[in-house]
């Protein structure tokens, strides 16, 4: 089964809680704080595996969860950090975050990795909060919350040469003739329902990866027929072999139509070098109209080569010509749409919302701090109150008109306001 687009849910591991604990040992009545730190939760990582060429393995399990970090222990023992959850994907996988649709990764190289959900850090034990003036702190941190993300993965096959043309132009037959690929071949439209890859060996040193792209029809850029489900695969190729069906009623129109559909889908496709061939030259009726087709395309500066995938006519010449274009090919310089580095949210940013006597404070940093607070320990609560004051939440609430006894909601936590 070939899959080139799938949606998955990934969840990193939560950080382990730090421990609030004091050393207990005979003859040492004041052993001091010795609560250990929690371990780090596992990241969720996508890793390119060159042996894969489909996303079908992810079809049967679309939810992935890394393990949580372990809790810290007494005697300054740190909890265990958990390993990353690695999800293998094929080269050519593009990763989008949902529902925003933001592009977050483009994986092309073997063993390339992308962290899509970062595991929470472990909380600190009370050993870290001891000072010369405060030697018995009831202060600790819970583990940092995990991340849950919905992702859309799209596969764009990475091939040197792409075979394009109308349905039944003979692309699959050509791929079978020049490589070890064995695509399905039949005499009805849309025999090829999924792209096929084949390796073409030129000599001991040269080889090419060739992709058979399913046939395109008018309106393909709008999704008609097999449409843009497979048009995207042409974007990765460097050189195109454009097959014209010799038995077509209007080969010139077919040629123009395919070029138009590619350009309408992605304007950059029209600049890709093409080798234009008229297929099925083993048939007398095709041989009779070759010169006419050659002359007509020649008026537009297009050179056409006669071939036959069945009799192997001119196949070696075709491959060497495509290989030469591949050697001469220069990747166009385009602005990357992928934001390689993004500035994180300002730690002091927050918003306040009022509903009657209920106040709601929203902000990534303040919500994370609330989740990492031991509310049963006075010292941890005081530390959280200082944080609210430091980033300006307290002043903002006072200016907004909060009254004694009003509730302040921060994520899942409810605090009662007292001046």
Image (tube, rainbow, N blue to C red):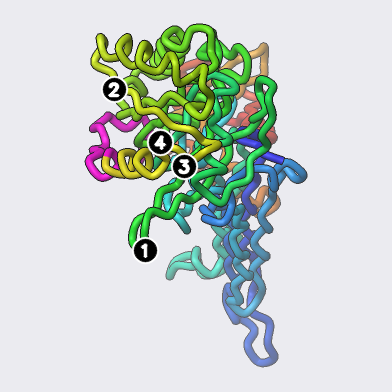
Where residue 70 appears, as percent x and y from the top left, is 67, 65
Say which label, 4 or 2, has the lower sequence index: 4
- Asked whether the residues under the numbered discs 2 and 3 touch, taking CB atoms below 8 Å apart as contact, a structural biologist would say no
Mark 2–mark 3 Cα distance, whole angstroms, equals: 21 Å
Indicate which label's residue lies in the foreground, 4 or 1. 1
Q: Secondary structure at mark 4?
A: loop
Identify the residue at horizontal 38%, vertical 44% (top origin).
316
Where residue 40 appears, as percent x and y from the top left, is 57, 61
Indicate which label's residue lies in the foreground, 4 or 3. 3
Mark 4–mark 1 Cα distance, whole angstroms, equals: 23 Å
Residue tagged by mark 1? 204
Say which label, 2 or 1, has the lower sequence index: 1
Q: Quadrant of the N terminus?
A: top right
Indicate which label's residue lies in the foreground, 1 or 3. 1
The magenta segment is: 325-342
Q: Is 149 located above or below residue 139 in the figure?
A: above
Q: Write down the quadrant of residue 225 in the picture.
A: top right
């Amino acid at each position: 089964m070939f899959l080139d687009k799938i949606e998955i849910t990934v969840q990193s591991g939560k950080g382990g809680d730090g421990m609030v604990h004091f050393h207990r040992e005979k003859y040492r009545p004041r052993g001091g704080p010795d609560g250990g730190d929690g371990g780090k939760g596992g990241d969720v990582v996508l890793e390119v595996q060159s042996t894969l060429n489909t996303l079908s393995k992810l079809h049967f399990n679309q939810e992935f969860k890394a393990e949580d970090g372990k809790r810290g222990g007494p005697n300054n023992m740190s909890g265990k950090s958990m390993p990353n959850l690695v999800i293998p994907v094929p080269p050519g996988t593009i990763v989008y975050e949902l529902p925003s649709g933001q592009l977050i990764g483009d994986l092309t190289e073997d063993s390339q990795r992308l962290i899509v959900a970062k595991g929470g850090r472990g909380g600190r034990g009370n050993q870290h909060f001891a000072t010369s003036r405060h030697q018995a702190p009831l202060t600790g941190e819970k583990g940092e919350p995990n991340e849950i993300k919905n992702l859309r993965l799209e596969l764009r096959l990475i091939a040197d040469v792409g075979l394009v043309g109308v349905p039944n132009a003979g692309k699959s037959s050509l791929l079978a003739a020049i490589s070890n690929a064995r695509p399905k071949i039949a005499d009805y439209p849309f025999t090829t329902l999924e792209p096929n890859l084949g390796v073409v060996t030129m000599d001991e040193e040269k080889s090419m990866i060739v992709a058979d792209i399913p046939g395109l029809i008018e309106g393909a850029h709008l999704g008609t027929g097999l449409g843009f489900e497979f048009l995207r695969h042409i974007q990765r190729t460097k050189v195109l072999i454009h097959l014209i069906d010799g038995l077509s009623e209007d080969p010139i129109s077919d040629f123009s139509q395919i070029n138009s559909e590619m350009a309408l889908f992605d304007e950059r496709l029209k600049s890709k070098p093409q080798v234009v061939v008229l297929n099925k030259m083993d048939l007398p009726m095709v041989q009779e109209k070759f010169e006419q087709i050659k002359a007509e395309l020649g008026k537009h500066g297009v050179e056409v080569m006669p071939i036959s995938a069945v009799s192997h006519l001119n196949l070696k010449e075709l491959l060497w010509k495509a290989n030469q274009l591949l050697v001469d090919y220069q990747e166009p310089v385009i602005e990357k749409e992928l934001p390689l580095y993004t500035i994180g949210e300002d730690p002091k940013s927050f918003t306040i919302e009022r509903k009657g006597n209920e106040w709601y404070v929203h902000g990534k940093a303040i919500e994370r701090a609330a989740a990492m607070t031991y509310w049963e320990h006075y010292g941890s609560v005081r530390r959280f109150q200082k944080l609210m004051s430091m980033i300006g939440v307290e002043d903002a609430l006072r200016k907004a008109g909060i009254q004694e006894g009003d509730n302040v909601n921060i994520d899942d936590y409810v605090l009662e306001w007292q001046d």
